[in-house]
Amino acid sequence: DAGVIQSPRHEVTEMGQEVTLRCKPISGHDYLFWYRQTMMRGLELLIYFNNNVPIDDSGMPEDRFSAKMPNASFSTLKIQPSEPRDSAVYFCASSWGGRYTGELFFGEGSRLTVL
Amino acid sequence: GNSVTQMEGPVTLSEEAFLTINCTYTATGYPSLFWYVQYPGEGLQLLLKATKADDKGSNKGFEATYRKETTSFHLEKGSVQVSDSAVYFCALSEMNRDDKIIFGKGTRLHILP
């Protein structure tokens, strides 16, 4: 079975450019989470969706970040304009039942470098 | 609010040594507790979990016991292998509150052959 699929795996861009990260969750999962991982802050929850509806976006750092989930099989995280401090690994994870199982299935991550 | 605190790394051990990675938590209710592992270049994956006090989670030779009296969930393994080198995350989720899973900052483990 396919796991969570993220693209691109690596992205290098210049400050001010728009960045779009993509995620395909595991089929049948009803929760989707976006996390950011840095050495300084560790793993931070940015936003999560339940049945394609954003439930909590309190972790989104600022208005430059936005996320959408137009259907059950696709989500995007967009940064516009990007800044060097956005450099991090961004993970998408999906789950069935969210907290009730506690088992999140993570993608391999998208490593973003903003120059 | 809920939080997870785990020992800072890196932790460096020789192969076949005994491993303990400490984790303590703060929660207002009755959380479920988890250990996730992240191998180099990969996403996190669930290693083990415990859903109530005194439960013991175990997998791949790792164990952790849910200790409500000490609010702890320490990860242990009797004999580590080089392939156990990874970053280990303690996490909690609290039912009847929200759907978030709160992660600790992670502990990097290096096993020397």
Image (cartoon, coloured by chain):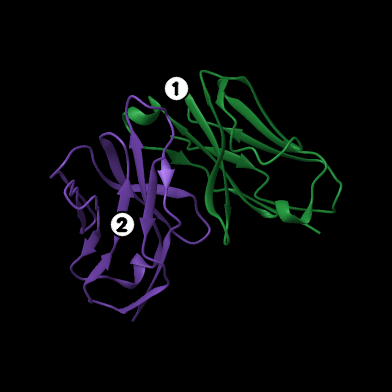
| Quarter placement of the C terminus of chain A | bottom right
Q: Residues within 10 Å of mark 1 (few under 14, many from 20)?
A: few
Task: Find residue A72 and report its horizontal and vertical position in percent.
Answer: 55, 20
Tell me the chain of label 2.
B
Task: Find residue A60 and report its horizontal and vertical position in percent.
Answer: 64, 37
Q: Residue at x 49, y 62 (%)?
A: B40
**Residue beneath disc 2:** B23
Left or right, B54 with respect to A22, comes to left
Q: Are the residues under badges 1 and 2 in a single subunit?
A: no
Secondary structure type for disc 1: loop
Tell me the chain of label 1.
A
Q: Nearer the viewer, residue B8 or A51?
A: B8
Q: Residue at x 44, y 39 (%)?
A: A105
Q: Type of residue at label 2?
A: Cys
Q: Colour of chain B?
A: purple
Q: Which one of the lettered chains is coloured green? A: A
Task: Find residue B5 and report its horizontal and vertical position in percent.
Answer: 37, 56
Q: With respect to residue A100, does A14 lie above or below?
A: below
Q: Residue at x 12, y 45 (%)?
A: B54
Secondary structure type for disc 2: strand
Which disc is residue A62 wearing?
A: none
- The residues tagged by marks 1 and 2 sit, at their Cα atoms, a distance apart of 32 Å
Residue B52's image quarter? top left
